[in-house]
Amino acid sequence: MQTILSILKKHVNTLLKLLPLLAFAVPFLWLYSLHPASFELMWKGRTFQLFFVWLIALELILGWESLQSSKINKLISIRTFAFIAALALPTIYVIISNYSGLNTAIADSARQSGVQWWDFMPLSTEYLVFTAFFCLIVFLSFGAKGLKVFSVPALFIATIGTIYTIDNVYPYGQFTPFQLLVPTTATLAAAVLNLMGYSTILTTQTDPLQGSLPLLTATDPSNPLRSAQFAIAWPCAGIESLLLFTVVTLLFLKRMPISWKAKIGYFAIGAAVTYFINILRIVSIFMIGMNGGDWKLFHNVYGPLYSVAWIVSYPLIILGSQSLWHKKSRKPQPLQPNPA
């Protein structure tokens, strides 16, 4: 027993750094055992929770040397007990929500309030509750400085929960601020399909429940039977991807020791690529639909991976480009002959 205590004391700082990550490992594994299919869904699923864990791990790796849990310095204190309790909160919430009827109560309350996608409210609430628990754990362990360090994963999961909630309450094209960019996206998707040799027709569909939606039809001129028609709402147009890109990239660039001009350049290039990737995703949905494939599976599972893979990779691309730039700038210049 004494040996175990001495080992824990020796590695207490390492353990404290890892606890914010480990606090969500148990509840996520539990949720996977209960709802494995939900972790295969990018839209209205739990795949983003895995990216949330990835972002926490990335922050730990990047700031391992400088990150210190200075707030938990006594074994017996009010803050220590509060910290231990906070670590258990994510698991306790999973138990209560799935075994005590909390999720059912949330869904029933949303339905009675007139929420159109009331059955998805427990999931969006779960994201927002996990956001609050994560911020509490980080604050108790690392203080206000820790909230700044882990701001990217915190805002990431909070953004997902907020987007899901907005779509539940204002589905399809009802949330007009997000819908403003959709007509341009639909027009560009039609242009790409035209370049690929397909004929397209773009109109507007107005519905009291769904709002105003661009309606795009694509047809293969050589085979009119190969046709697909979809109404495009803001979730389909990748607005959530642009929001996630903005949150992750701006907070990442804020920590980069580079000029503000370079930060603007990195952000503009990344945003343009994110937007174009979403256009390619829409084009892919039409291609799958015209060929009789399972476009719903692509829409919910594989399609969002286009932009998410890019968003989580872009910070690494920035780091790599900066490393190459510094190596190039430090490259010794050849000596010039001294004129006689």
Image: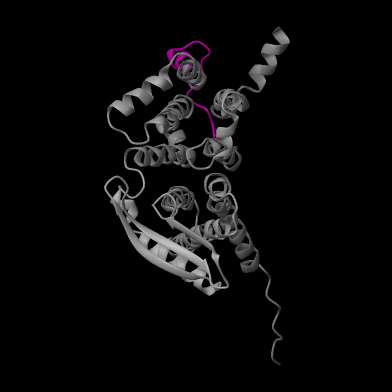
Camera-side residue: 286 or 335? 286
Describe the colour scheme in one phrase: one colour
Q: In the rendering, at what x and y percent does residue 93 appear? A: 47, 20
Among the 4 quarters of the image, the one containing residue 330: bottom right
Q: Residue at x 58, y 52 (%)?
A: 313
Q: Majority secondary structure of the magenta segment?
A: loop
Could you say which quadrant of the image residue 163 lies in?
Answer: top left
Q: Which quadrant is home to the C terminus?
A: bottom right
Residue drawn at (45%, 48%) of the image: 244
- Please give left or right for residue 252 compared with residue 178 in the image: right
Range of residues picked out in magenta: 66-82
Residue 265 showing in the rendered view: no
Q: Does the image show residue 319?
A: yes
Examine the rendered structure and indicate whether residue 164 appears above or below residue 299.
Answer: above
Asked which quadrant contains residue 4, the reply is: top right
Which residue extends farthest top? 1
Near-viewer residue (207 or 283): 207
Magenta stretch holds residue 77: yes
The residue shown at (45%, 19%) is 97
x and y percent of residue 294 in the render?
58, 49
